Image: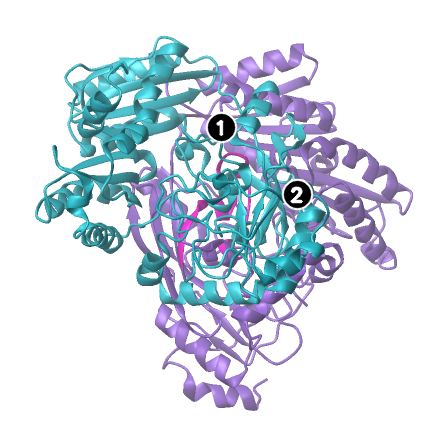
Chain colours: A cyan, B purple
Amino acid sequence: MLNDATDALIPLLPAGVLRDMAPAYLDEPRGRFRGRAGLIAAPRSVDEVSAIVRACADAHVPIVPRGGGTGLVGGQVMPDGTVPLVLSLERMSAIRAIYPEEGVIVAEAGATLHQIRDAAGRAGRQFPLALASGGTAQIGGVLATNAGGVNVLRYGNARALCLGVEAVLPQGQVMHDLKRLRKDNTGYDIRDLLIGAEGTLGIITAASLVLAPVPAETGVAMLVVDSPESALILLSLAQARMAGGVTAFELISGQGLRFLDVAFPDLRQPFPDRPDWLVLIEVGLPSGLSADDALETLFTDAAEAGLVSDGVIARSGQQAADLWAVRETIPEANRHIGAIASHDISLPLTEIARFIRDAGAMLAGMADLRINCFGHLGDGNLHFNLFPAEGRTRDVYDGVRRALSRAVHHMVVTRGGSFSAEHGVGRLKAADLAEWGDPARLAAMRAIKDALDPAGIMNPGVILT
Amino acid sequence: MLNDATDALIPLLPAGVLRDMAPAYLDEPRGRFRGRAGLIAAPRSVDEVSAIVRACADAHVPIVPRGGGTGLVGGQVMPDGTVPLVLSLERMSAIRAIYPEEGVIVAEAGATLHQIRDAAGRAGRQFPLALASGGTAQIGGVLATNAGGVNVLRYGNARALCLGVEAVLPQGQVMHDLKRLRKDNTGYDIRDLLIGAEGTLGIITAASLVLAPVPAETGVAMLVVDSPESALILLSLAQARMAGGVTAFELISGQGLRFLDVAFPDLRQPFPDRPDWLVLIEVGLPSGLSADDALETLFTDAAEAGLVSDGVIARSGQQAADLWAVRETIPEANRHIGAIASHDISLPLTEIARFIRDAGAMLAGMADLRINCFGHLGDGNLHFNLFPAEGRTRDVYDGVRRALSRAVHHMVVTRGGSFSAEHGVGRLKAADLAEWGDPARLAAMRAIKDALDPAGIMNPGVILT
């Protein structure tokens, strides 16, 4: 796969950074794209990253930065165009420092989410960003994609948890901005520009991150609601009482529970009748309050108000883990069933219930299919995924797939929503961004890309086409 | 003050936008700079803002965007260079919409902080950004400077409270991005680039903002500590218990209390002996917990641990307001005394106590002066202000003022801190930024400025010189 440009590049790279080609460097989890690579480089320091970027800029070789490779929009692979160098952060995985009294950890880009969470836990703190892929996902990629997860409601996206970054910009300059400050108003917010830029404006090599106190009391409950409307009223009620102590509020549909029955028949589900809608609520409360009592009172009052018809409150850490397992196994069950199309959307909270109804009706008129709608309801973020009708196969829908997704995204965008809530744009949604994005914002993005990466070598084809 | 360029501009402007010149358009609160202006324009709509910006870009007339004018770094005035047009957002002050169930308000740039807080309050929510200047400060300026205030510890800076903006970019393009979404990963974060850019990359004309639930229980206490070290241990203790319910944690020095005695002898102070260090703590807690009890327990335990020697817990809203008045009157007392130099600095939390000691010793070796150190200790943000020794006047320090500030900023920056925590750069600290800023970050800022504002008309001289 080598070519003249990469041949010429080799002598310019720091000694020992090249790795053997392996298929894992060219994969992405949903199998939609297959990357190519001339070279795989795994630098051990920010200076080596800088040297590689300089060499690639000089030789006009594109760079695909690669973390854990768990992204869902094809941002980690380059399937066509000039053969790139894949720059893997796997060897830069140190926890450089931890400051429990400050609530700060400084980690290199290649550290996995679980490494960081474990280090925080050992220091009596928590890093409150939780993804199902956290054993593989690396913090560099988590930041580059501004990942979300289940605790955004309380702690924000990756963006909100990052105080500073060390990064290599597209001409090889090293930006040293690993501050441990909650406040620093000294000019343009380059940090937030790199976060969510999916490796197209530079490579984050390390970050200082917020560690939160572990709440004194935590609790988990799963409640049966009759509709997404009721779920949202329940959310309001819970937030009014818990003073920001609602740390997760997840929606699960009956369709998701039935998919679990098919794919994971041994998984323990709390309600034998597979209700139409469930809510998983997690709370973190001050000392002096029992989380169980708070959830019990919420349940009783919500039941009296007709919002909730049944529910379980976890009485142990194991029960809490079992309830979470129901939620977190849904993506695997979805893969087992095989989606026609997946949509990672967000909407204003007051638009959500109507959207679920209207989109369901619209799609029923377009094709015979099943919808598994689930996700981070508290953030207005749904995973709205379409599956073949019972007994059908995916390929039956090949002709209508694109029209289905366009119709979903059109309804989302016209109601003030986003066609990519937490997964990012990558290659998969670059055309959606070009179509649905605000023109002035797109022009500003393009101007910034051209200004910072004039050679266009950083992850070309991602975000901007 | 008119000149050829502004004469030529007048016929290009929308009808009725020009205002009479008034001194208030050329002021800034500390009297360090005095602005000039050829024209004052007060548009009534985003389209009028766009037309004005286009006209100025064509005529090469600089624009100084102006909100409430309360900024402390001279970002709202242009004292030299080509005579500018001052663009006041005073007529764009509508609350466009409020969505209490979503926790979102959409306000125009000219709405004051108090207008927004009042509208939120009427809807049973709170806008948790509080500044002493909130009756005058407008949200457009609050966002442009990424203002902080007393509740950053719990709710973040202005940046963290903004979900979307409508803005006019430097060539007149209108960016429509007034989303009401908690999650929207669709490309570069232009919103956060405009926030904190102090009007140098465009003009924010409206914003969608986060409204938070009002905590069920709130409480305020003022506690006497023997040192900043003890204050920080107290903060850790409080945060471990309150699960994020500590909404403010302010440090007050004995020097500040003595300045209050001089400037506001009638102000009720809780401790007659004017202790060396006080902490004001505010908590917002879930229902089912008494804030008074929680503060009482904290006080007892902190006293047993030797952290706190005395304290008062507010027993009424009036008492809470009285305690806050002690904190919030300090800036006025400072103005009464007359500072030699003011420093709005932040440091990593574990560096703060040592900095206060070391900076005090260093300055004592440079001049005979008094230090009033106070501020948002929970955020690592101190206002470290220098005053003449008793009986001396400010002008005595004219020869040493610059050296004093440089020494303070040098000590801050070498310890991982920031020379502008919450006030911004403006004109006052543009040279500091050029000196202390990371070179790669500065180069990226300059490239972005040139790309988005090629004519250089947006607030020239602010942030980048």
Numbered circle sitting on residue A178: 2
**Is residue B153 positioned above or below B465 on the image?**
above
Residue closest to the eye, A279 or A133: A133
Q: How many marks?
A: 2
Region in magenta? B143-165
Q: On the same chain: label 1 and label 2?
A: yes
How far is mark 1 from mark 2, CA to CA?
A: 24 Å
The disc numbered 2 marks a residue on which chain?
A
Measured as percent of width and height from the top left, residue B152 is found at 53, 39
**Is residue A264 positioned above or below A23 on the image?**
above
The residue depicted at 69 percent of the width and 62 percent of the height is B430
Measured as percent of width and height from the top left, residue B225 is found at 69, 23
Q: Quadrant of the C terminus of chain A?
A: bottom left
Residue closest to the eye, A461 or A179: A461
Left or right of residue B243: residue B447 = right
Measured as percent of width and height from the top left, residue A335 is found at 29, 33
B184 is within the stretch colored magenta: no
Query: Helix or strand or loop: what does disc 1 sit on?
Result: loop
Left or right of residue A96: residue A440 = left
Front: mark 1 or 2: 1
Amino acid at dot 2: Leu
Q: Residue furthest right?
A: B365
Query: Helix or strand or loop: what does disc 2 sit on?
Result: loop
**Residue A2 occupies which quadrant of the picture?**
bottom right
Residue A150 visible within the image: yes
The disc numbered 1 marks a residue on which chain?
A
**Residue A8 occupies which quadrant of the picture?**
bottom right
Mark 1 lies on residue: A135
